[in-house]
Image (cartoon, rainbow, N blue to C red):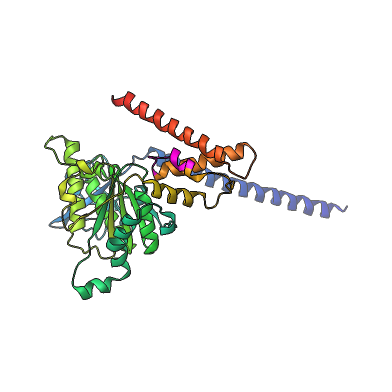
Amino acid sequence: MKPGLDKAVFSYSTSSDSGELEEENKLLRDTVEQLRGEIEKYRSPALLVAEVGDVIWQGDARHAVIKVPNGNQFYVEVSEHVKDLVPGDSILVEQKNLTVVDKVSSTKKFAVEQFVILEKPTVSWKDVGGLKTQVEEIKEVIELPLKKPELFRKVGITPPKGILLYGPPGTGKTLLAKAVAHSTKSTFIEVVGSELVQKFIGEGAKLVKEIFELAREKAPSVVFIDEIDALASKRVDMGTSGEREVQRTFMQLLAEIDGFKNLGNVKIIGCTNRRDILDEAVVRPGRLDRLIEVPTPKRDGLKEILKIHTRKMKVEKRADMNKILNKMEGFSGAEVKAVVTEAGYYAIRANRTLVKEADFFKAIVKVKRTEEAEGKDFIGMFG
């Protein structure tokens, strides 16, 4: 190779290497800057989420009255770059002197979805057995006003806002609520009463308010409050902060039911195993005034429930269903379902798809034994 060509190749190789090194250096500098930024994030203190109570101007200086999560209120300064601050806004405040440094874009003060089950149920009236009277009452109070509201306007009456289902555990109260939501194509919003009682002052009441706002947005909807006795039990003058917070939340629930805002296509179904401890304020006329008892099923009811749960099951033809029903006397609907499930498991363990009469008898014994064991544990804890 000629000397001039060797020099050109060497020059090209050197410039190529320096270009690669420059690219690597640039990449490393960017990485270092990114890591420095991350370290600064770790060093910077967390900001506190609060709510604006009022905005106050003193000359050109802007201040705000804010409410922090524990319920305390403070008069604080507002950073100049925070624009359009109005009462009710969610804000970020610096922890040391509580200066307002930014607004939170979300309009929700609570993630309501953490406290409720929101769904479109697939349970139909065909899945409900042994509760003919209760089904008719619920259709009358909940289904008819949602499906034919013009009928009530013509007659000139206002339909009930809600109902209370009460009775022993496992008798089908939740099933009835889901079935009516399905039949009216309503959104089913399920919340447990104990979840509404929050730790900090006023939070439970706000949560109740937001649940009903959600219900109005998703209307037609059915708000199902399970274990309502945790919230709406008879009020006693104990004077503890926890007791006062429960009462505040309860009063908010009553205010939402009575409400300045019409509930419209929102229906409320309360559910409890302890009707005797409920405060009369929640079941008076104009609130949950239709009380529907859901008792342990009688023999005909048990027969219907057993038929519903075994309709997709291959049961041997010689199985005597009357004998099986005799053994299940006093069972709830949930216990009947448990028996059918256990009978299916006995067939699976024997590598069969056909369920035999003996499988049902063994399942009944197992369910009874489980119930007795749970009863003994309960007595052991509180007896």
Which portion, as a residue range, is magenta?
A: 323-332
Relative placement, left or right, of 322 versus 208 is: right
Res 71 → quadrant? top left
Q: Is residue 225 above or below residue 358?
A: below
Q: Nearer the viewer, residue 64 or 52?
A: 52
- Is residue 27 shown in magenta? no
Residue 247 place in picture, x, y as percent: 17, 43
Relative placement, left or right, of 343 versus 193 is: right
- Is residue 329 shown in magenta? yes
Relative placement, left or right, of 378 versus 37 is: left
Q: Nearer the viewer, residue 303 or 102?
A: 303
Relative placement, left or right, of 93 versus 21 is: left
Which residue is located at x 18 percent, y 59 percent?
259
Q: Nearer the viewer, residue 277 or 238?
A: 277
State which quarter of the image contains the C terminus.
top left
Name the outermost residue toward the bottom: 154
Residue 85 place in picture, x, y as percent: 23, 58
Which residue is located at x 84 percent, y 52 percent?
3
Residue 199 place in picture, x, y as percent: 25, 39
Q: Is residue 76 visible?
A: no
Q: Nearer the viewer, residue 121 or 91?
A: 121
Which residue is located at x 55 percent, y 40 percent?
357
Q: Is residue 245 visible?
A: yes
Residue 186 place in picture, x, y as percent: 36, 62
How many numbered marks does the figure carry? Answer: 0
Q: Is residue 92 above or below residue 263?
A: above
